[in-house]
């Protein structure tokens, strides 16, 4: 009841006004730059600089327009608190977007999703995420082992994967990742009900050598997400010559399908199970998919290539802003 009372009274509007004033103060101090950056600081640009250092260099050289980077998915927004959603859009999103010189998306599908929101999208463009290429290995992969690697989150479609395991009796699955929502007990119970608990291992968070071993030795990656603005783990798998199974809601799904580096299937238990059976039943096709995935990453998703594209977009937007002021 309390949140409903807040919405009916003036508290919401007071909070919105407060946030707007905060943004105005921030905007003056930042000299018009609005920067929301999601690239991990451990990754480097083509010139060897960390991305944030690269942006600082651009600012020092006179770059002023704001560039927005982020994830904007209407279906995910509607799953969140109505109060938080309304506060965010009314107090922040509209103003932020209206003052941006450009909007960066990591995939065309993310751009298409954002167009459904009631916000302006000034000068949108797509530059994908990148990856450091690991060395090529020839280690044998474990037979019939599916790998899910990522956050244990409702949007990842793990309930669908567990149901699909009933229709793929030759498969076992390793689910590795941090459980942000305490979903693991529910997923374990679902696996027990389905009679597949003995073929599903919940590994918990993995990193470093343990993560690399899973990517190097599992048969295929499976990512049955309901929404995935890009899908970095798909890049990581393809870089290790691992074939992938993804849903159309994964940002990289079109690249996977066009390159032949995996299978794209809807996230229903029946269709996912059929894709798993197809993947596990054809070793030569899996090897071909893995090789194509590695080639795709080498050609399009190394940090050198991504940084070059990002530098080009910053230069273009900066030149357009200066021309407009002239």
Image (tube, helix red, strand yellow):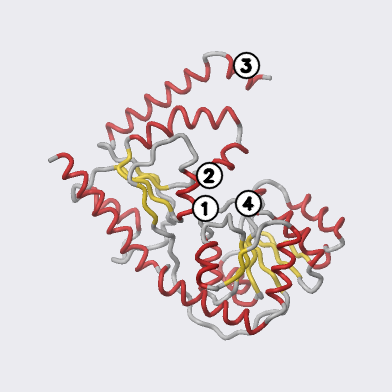
Q: Which residue is labeled 4 in the image?
A: 226
x%, y% of residue 105? 42, 51
**Of marks 4 and 3, which one's residue comes earlier in the chain?**
3
User: Do tag 1 and tag 3 residues touch (Cβ < 8 Å)?
Assistant: no
Q: Residue at x 33, y 28 (%)?
A: 24
Q: Which type of secondary structure does the marked residue at label 2 adopt? A: loop
Q: Residue 21 location, x and y as percent?
A: 37, 24
Q: Looking at the image, is mark 1 or mark 3 nearer the viewer? A: 1
Choose the circle earlier in sequence order: 1 or 2: 2
Which residue is the site of mark 3?
Answer: 5
x and y, in percent, of residue 20 in the image: 39, 26
In the visual, does 260 lie left or right of 306?
right
Disc on the earlier residue, 1 or 3: 3
Q: CA distance from mark 1 to mark 3?
A: 34 Å
Q: Residues within 10 Å of mark 4 (few under 14, many from 20)?
A: some
Q: Are marks 1 and 2 in contact (CB under 8 Å)?
A: yes
Q: Is residue 32 above or below residue 257?
A: above
Sort mark 1 into few (<14), some (14-19) or many (20+) by Cα contacts within 10 Å. many
**Eye-nearest disc, 4 or 3:** 4
- Residue in the foreground of this view, choosing between 206 and 85: 85
**In the rendered image, which residue does mark 1 sit on?**
229
Q: Under tag 3, what secondary structure?
A: helix
For discs 2 and 3, the disc positioned in front in the rendered view? 2
């Amino acid at each position: 009841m309390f949140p409903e009372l807040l919405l009916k009274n003036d508290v919401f509007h007071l909070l919105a006004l407060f946030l707007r004033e905060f943004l105005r103060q921030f905007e003056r101090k930042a000299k018009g730059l609005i920067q929301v950056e999601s690239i991990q600081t451990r990754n480097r640009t083509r010139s060897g600089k960390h991305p944030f250092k690269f942006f600082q260099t651009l600012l020092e050289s006179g770059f002023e327009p704001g560039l927005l980077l982020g994830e904007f998915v209407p279906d995910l927004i509607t799953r969140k608190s109505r109060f938080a959603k309304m506060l965010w859009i009314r107090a922040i999103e509209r103003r932020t977007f209206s003052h941006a010189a450009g909007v960066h998306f990591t995939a065309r599908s993310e751009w298409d999703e954002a167009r459904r929101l009631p916000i302006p999208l000034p000068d949108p463009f797509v530059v994908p995420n990148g990856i450091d290429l690991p060395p090529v290995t020839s280690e044998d992969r474990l037979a019939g082992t599916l790998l899910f690697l990522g956050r244990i989150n409702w949007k990842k479609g793990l309930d669908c994967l567990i149901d699909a395991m009933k229709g793929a009796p030759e498969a076992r699955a390793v689910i590795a990742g941090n459980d942000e929502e305490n979903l693991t007990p529910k997923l374990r119970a679902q696996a027990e009900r389905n009679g597949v608990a003995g073929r599903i291992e919940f590994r918990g968070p993995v990193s470093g050598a343990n993560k690399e071993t899973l990517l190097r030795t599992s048969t295929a990656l499976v990512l049955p997400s309901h929404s995935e603005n890009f899908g970095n783990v798909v890049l990581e798998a393809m870089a290790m010559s691992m074939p992938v199974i993804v849903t159309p809601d994964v940002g990289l799904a079109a690249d996977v399908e066009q390159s032949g580096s995996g299978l794209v299937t809807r996230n229903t238990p029946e269709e996912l199970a059929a894709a798993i059976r197809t993947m596990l039943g054809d070793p030569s096709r899996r090897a071909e998919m893995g090789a194509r995935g590695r080639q795709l990453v080498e050609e399009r998703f190394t940090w050198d290539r991504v940084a070059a594209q990002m530098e080009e977009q910053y230069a273009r937007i900066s030149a357009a802003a200066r021309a407009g002021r002239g």
